[in-house]
Amino acid sequence: NNLSIILGERLLTIGYVSKKTGLSRGTISTIYHRRADSVRLDTLKKICDCLQIPLSELIEYTPKGGD
């Protein structure tokens, strides 16, 4: 995910995103530090709405290769 890059470029904090989205600082921090094994789509949507970005800018998925 690109959350740390996006927040860094915009000089925003985890606390700011937490306040604006209503998500806990712990949730945002886990995503920011790439420690989350799974994240609810609703959570990602709240972050994208807060930052006014499409989901594809926040996360990217590259399929594992081959059969």
Image (spheres, rainbow, N blue to C red):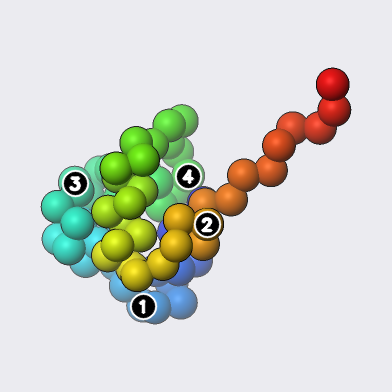
The structure residue drawn at horizontal position 39% and vertical position 46%, both measured from the top left corner, is 31
Mark 1–mark 4 CB contact (< 8 Å): no
Q: Is residue 64 left or right of residue 23?
A: right
User: How far apart in space, not on screen, are marks 1 and 4 (Cα)?
Assistant: 19 Å
In primary-sequence order, the first of circles 3 and 1 is 1
Instruction: Tell me the element at label 2.
Output: helix
Q: Neighbour class for label 4 at 10 Å: few (<14), some, many (≥20)?
A: few
Mark 2, mark 1: which one is toward the viewer?
2
Residue 11 rendering spot, x and y as whole percentages: 36, 77
Residue 11's disc is 1
Q: Amino acid at mark 1?
A: Leu
Instruction: Tell me the element at label 3.
Output: loop
The structure residue drawn at horizontal position 14% and vertical position 60%, both measured from the top left corner, is 19
Residue 24's disc is 3
Q: Is residue 17 left or right of residue 58?
A: left
Residue 35 rendering spot, x and y as whole percentages: 45, 38
User: How far apart in space, not on screen, are marks 2 and 1 (Cα)?
Assistant: 21 Å
